[in-house]
Image: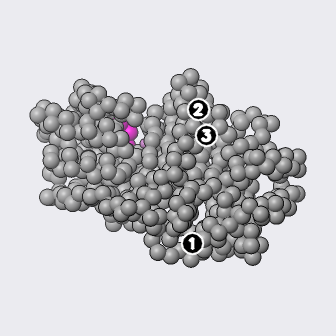
Amino acid sequence: MRSHALLPSALLLLGSLTLTAACANGSGTPDPSPESMQAGPSSSASRTVDPSRIKGLRIVNDGSEQSSCPFAISYPDVPGAEEMTSAMRKDVDQRLAAFRSSRCDNGSPSAGELNVSHRFLVASGDVLGVRLTTLDGSGVGNGQSTSTYWYDGENGAYRQALDLISDGSRDAFTAALKKQLRGREGVDPSYLDDAFADTTHLADLLDDLSFTADGNLRAELDRGTVGADAAGSHVVSLDKATITPWLSPFGLRAQQQTEHPGNDLDLGAPSTPSAAVPTHSASADDDTDCKKVKCIALTFDDGPAAPETATLLNHLDRYEARVTFFTVGQNVAAHPELVRAEVKAGHEVGNHSWNHPDLTKLTPEQIAYQLGRTSGAIKAATGKAPTLFRPPYGAVNAKVKAATTLSPVLWDVDTEDWKYRDGAKVARTVIAKARRNSVVLMHDIHPTSVAAVPEILRTLTAEGFRFVTVSHLRATL
Ligand code: NI
């Protein structure tokens, strides 16, 4: 994540994403995917890992829904790999603290958002590999950066990317990388020599190493490290025959598990029973007539999350309340069973993008990708594609609306539950502000928000409210 600071980091967040994508693909057409940098030519495609197969997986989520302090972070917590989770938490917390103090507390409204998203590279045998992609538009950070984190189950140890290479082969490895980079468009020779000369920071410079499905090694160097910021990041690939002799014993296993994924991931953690998934079934279609009775639509964003969403479903069942979940695609992929349970219980599932970016800052292709990939994950989990979306931070404009057929849903009661992690306060806010046909914003990634729900349901039921989905509210008004 280290970089030269020769240029002011004034490049806009998404400008950098586009540049990076164009650079990494070696073509003029930016790939809209946030992971476009990982796509590369089809011959060196990376593996797709199904995170729902990872036993006991929990996704650590945090975020806001306010455009004055826009952040969304997400990284996995895999049983057995606690040391790796701690390393990710440390890096992410540092970023978040800097972002919040510069962007949210001191208010620089022109600055962009902080977004940390995750992707599994390998989750097989005793090897776990994860890439975190960070977009930091606060001016404190440096646009986009990526890092890979590795866990070696055989030795019970967290590994940095450079640990994939054996100590004795690092000189040969770095010489091969430099050779590929020198003379490439956007690479500045003086940056290049400086970056590699500083061996104490080599692990920071080379903090994104992974393998492709055919065993090649892929290195991504963040923007600003070997060239000016504007040149974007730089992807280097070393073929299997070249890299294999230089790999450490763990590197060899990581390569093997990427090329030929074996059994399910087993890091030797004591067996963790999967969290219970509620099995409530909606008795029938909801026949509430919102013209005749007081209706209210509670909405829960950013999930699903284990175990919070399961707890929430149990609360809702007790009061026969129906609500709307605006789910984030990367969490749907991790917990499709919870999304299925939401639909089975009669709730509505909407789309809240793949990894919670401000959609107004994206190109139409990127917007379509964010929403399309998420709708695909929801359909795969439930058999039914969503019809509604909630734009992250409530940020929506004509460009966003034109890029999708989904209907946008905002809100009129904001609990600010992401800021106040206090169940009693969240309950008081909803109860005080609830009006007939209100749409209430909450988040089921926070245990405090879930804990507020029984009191909300009890009090508002007594006041004659009926809890309906957003589509039901719209259809019967
Ligand atoms: Ni959100």
Q: Distance from label 1 to label 2 (Cα)?
A: 36 Å
Ligand 1: does it lie within 8 Å of the C-beta at label 1? no
Indicate the secondary structure of the residue bearing disc 2: helix
Residue at the spot of label 3: 136
Q: Residue at x 37, y 44 (%)?
A: 445
Identity, as a three-letter code, of the amino acid under mark 1: Gln
Outermost residue, front direction? 155
Residue 435 seen by the camera: yes
Crowding around mark 3 (Cα neighbors within 10 Å: few <14, some 14 to 19, many 20+) is many
> Is there any visible trace of residue 295 in the rendered image?
no
**Magenta residue span:** 407-411
In this view, the residue in front, 310 or 439, is 310
**Quadrant holding ligand 1?**
top left
Coordinates of residue 267 in the picture (x, y in percent): 47, 64
Mark closer to the chain start, 3 or 1: 3
| Residue behind mark 2 | 98
Give me the C-alpha separation between circle 3 and circle 1: 32 Å
Which dot, 3 or 2, sits closer to the camera?
Answer: 2
